[in-house]
């Protein structure tokens, strides 16, 4: 029965996908996020940097608790940004301004152990972590849509 449901859903996905994406975006919220991203000359404020440091500490703590030697879930994700005019696309890649706020969307699909679709809306800030010599992206989402199906029904 589950396979029939998944086959039907897959058949409808071509027409449902865009509808889900549109329904999943709260346009009044996206408008407020756009205004927030444009505020303060797009510069990340001390409040944003405080949130960045808080989530970095939480991620470091979570990484220290990992005990699995192999992945326990299979998923794929994507991130999309508005305001691409602030980026410089070259033959070698893309240059992004650091410490600037962008409107951002994140998609997430998981296939195992559950079937999941998630779409988030919010803002992003690119920044360098000099200690680890990495380019990082802080994502602050204020809207999330979840659609899930599991073999156990929860």
Image (tube, grey):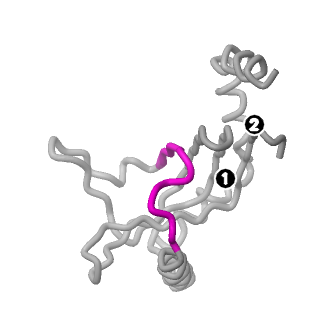
Q: Position of residue 44 (x, y in %)?
A: 47, 75
* Element type at mark 2: helix
Of labels 2 and 1, earlier in sequence is 2
Residue 52: tell me if it is visible. no
Name the element at disc 1. Answer: helix
Task: Judge by depth and name the residue closer to the eye, 60 or 130.
Answer: 60
Rendered-image quadrant of the N terminus: top right
Q: Which residues are magenta?
A: 66-82
Q: Is residue 76 left or right of residue 14?
A: left
Say if residue 53 shows up in the picture.
yes
In the picture, the disc for residue 100 is none
Q: Position of residue 11 (x, y in %)?
A: 68, 14
* Closer to the camera in the image, 148 or 82: 148
- Looking at the image, residue 58 lies above or below residue 69: below
Residue at far left of view = 92
Q: In this figure, which residue is indicated by the disc labeled 2?
A: 23
**With respect to residue 154, does 35 lie above or below?**
below
Q: Where is residue 151, by image quadrant?
A: top right
Q: Which residue is mark 1?
A: 31
Asked if 6 appears above or below 43 in the picture, the reply is: above
**95 sits to left or right of 52:** left
For residue 109: magenta? no
């Amino acid at each position: 029965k589950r396979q029939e449901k998944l086959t039907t859903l897959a058949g409808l996905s071509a027409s449902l996908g865009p509808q889900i994406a549109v329904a999943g975006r709260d346009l009044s919220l996206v408008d407020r996020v756009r205004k927030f991203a444009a505020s303060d000359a797009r510069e990340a404020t001390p409040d944003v940097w405080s949130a960045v440091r808080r989530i970095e500490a939480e991620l470091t703590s979570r990484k220290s608790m990992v005990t699995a030697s192999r992945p326990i879930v299979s998923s794929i994700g994507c991130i999309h940004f508005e305001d691409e005019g602030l980026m410089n696309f070259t033959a070698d890649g893309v240059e992004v301004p650091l410490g600037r706020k962008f409107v951002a969307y994140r998609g997430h699909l998981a296939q195992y152990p559950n079937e999941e679709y998630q779409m988030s809306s919010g803002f992003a800030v690119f920044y360098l972590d000099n200690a680890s010599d990495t380019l990082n992206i802080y994502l602050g989402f204020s809207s999330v849509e979840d659609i899930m199906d599991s073999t156990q029904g929860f």
